[in-house]
Amino acid sequence: MILISACLLGGNCKYNGGNNLQEKLQALIKDKDYRLICPEVEGGLPVPRPPAEIIGGDGFDVLEGKASVQNNRGDNVTSHYLKGAKRLLEEIDPEQIQLAIMKSKSPSCGLKKIHAGKFNGNLREGPGVCTALFIKNGIKVVNEKDMDDIKKLI
Ligand code: SF4
């Protein structure tokens, strides 16, 4: 099975109530065995919701309690991010996951870069919280921009 960030296939679960539909990805994956996931909704956050960023690190740091996730109102939403990622992991068998295709730059789903915690558009290296948990559990993760890799791996 392939896991895929729900907003990439048109799910309106993005913080502002919209989506990040990638039509080429949608066409590529349409006949595959896939499951849509949204770690933030899984963690109990509403749609829409204030945008959030990881403060003081990346997703690995959040898992280790060394960084937090806060929204742009200053609310600490770390527990929702951890809950969503852990619930998704509980619902799957990592050995049965061929690939997870995760939305770039998200504090949950980002892979190579995420927003840097200043709400000014700056990015930093590192994954989001759910991606970090997936990587720690041996799941192969790519983001939606890695179309060449996705074609090879699915
Ligand atoms: S948490 Fe992931 S799946 Fe959900 S809206 Fe954000 S990027 Fe998309």
Image (cartoon, grey):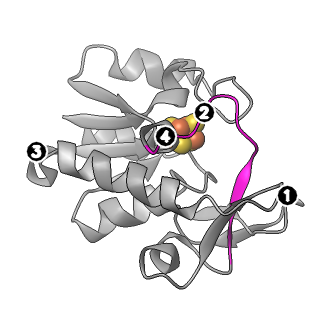
Pointer 1 residue: 121
Q: CA distance from mark 4 to mark 2?
A: 6 Å
- Magenta stretch: includes residue 79: no
* Magenta stretch in the rendered image: 43-55
Name of the residue lying farthest toward the right: 120
The answer to whether the beta carbon of the residue marked 4 is less than 8 Å from any atom of ligand 1 is: no
Assign a secondary structure to mark 4: loop
Q: Residue at x 43, y 15 (%)?
A: 27
Q: Earlier in the sequence, mark 1 or mark 2?
A: 2
The disc at residue 69 is: none
List the residue tagged with mark 2: 46
Quadrant the C terminus occupies: top left
The kind of residue on which mark 1 rests is: Gly
Our reading of the magenta stretch's main secondary structure is loop
For the residues labelled 4 and 3, say whether their Cβ atoms are less than 8 Å apart: no
Badge 2: few (under 14), some or many (20 or more) residues near its Cα, within 10 Å? some
- Residue 52 lies, with reference to residue 12, above or below; the image says below
